[in-house]
Amino acid sequence: REFLEFISSRYESMDEAFVVIDGEKGNGKITCREFEEGIRKMKCKKFKGQNEASRISEIFRYLDPSGEGEISKQEWAVLNKMLKEIDLSIWEFVQFCDRTWPPVDPASLSTAWHALDEDGSGSITKKEWVGVLREAGFFGPALPIFCFIDQDDHGTVDAAVFDGLLKYR
């Protein structure tokens, strides 16, 4: 999921990300080495840390269900299906926000933002996000949605990023 969050926030399509990894004149398949190098080339920091290599390898193996050591474009296409699922979850979240905190301005999510930013700091942490949503009765995938919109991986979301969810209204 973290890799999908990263790709979808930086590339127009999953196909574009595939070409970045495989290369403009690639062979239409991504090897494990190409995948690792592609993640570094993309400057993806989602996996930094002690288990970086094994986490990247796990994603590669997931995307290569045939086990032949290469990810084809067809195998890569599973990411499109996963992205649709995330989009649906975010759409449901925005609908929840509109029902729970009716918008004053239909061109803004500011009412929901102020409810979520409990401490008024101008940014929402994971802990704040999960706590407020649990208290408000949201039973959807709160943490994955937070991680998806926390594009810079700093563990916070600000009002401008949150307003980006308007496209799901």
Image: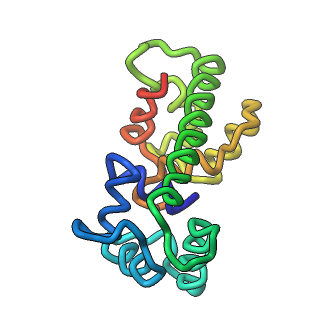
- Residue 46's x, y, as percent? 49, 69
- Residue 84's x, y, as percent? 54, 39
Identity of the residue furthest to the left in this view: 24
Q: How is the image coloured?
A: rainbow
Relative placement, left or right, of 78 versus 137 is left
Q: Nearer the viewer, residue 138 or 36?
A: 36
Compared with 95, 138 (above or below) is below
Query: Residue 20 sits in which quadrant?
Result: bottom left
Image quarter in which the N terminus is found = bottom right
Which residue appears at 58% of the width and 48% of the height? 82
Q: Nearer the viewer, residue 45 or 84?
A: 84
Which residue appears at 48% of the width and 27% of the height? 168
Which residue appears at 37% of the width and 53% of the height? 15
- Residue 57's x, y, as percent? 57, 79
Which residue appears at 40% of the width and 42% of the height? 161
- Residue 39's x, y, as percent? 40, 73
- The image shows a total of numbered marks equal to 0
Compared with 36, 90 (above or below) is above
Q: Nearer the viewer, residue 60 or 97?
A: 60
Compared with 168, 149 (above or below) is below
Q: Nearer the viewer, residue 110 or 57?
A: 57
Query: Residue 55 sits in which quadrant?
Result: bottom right
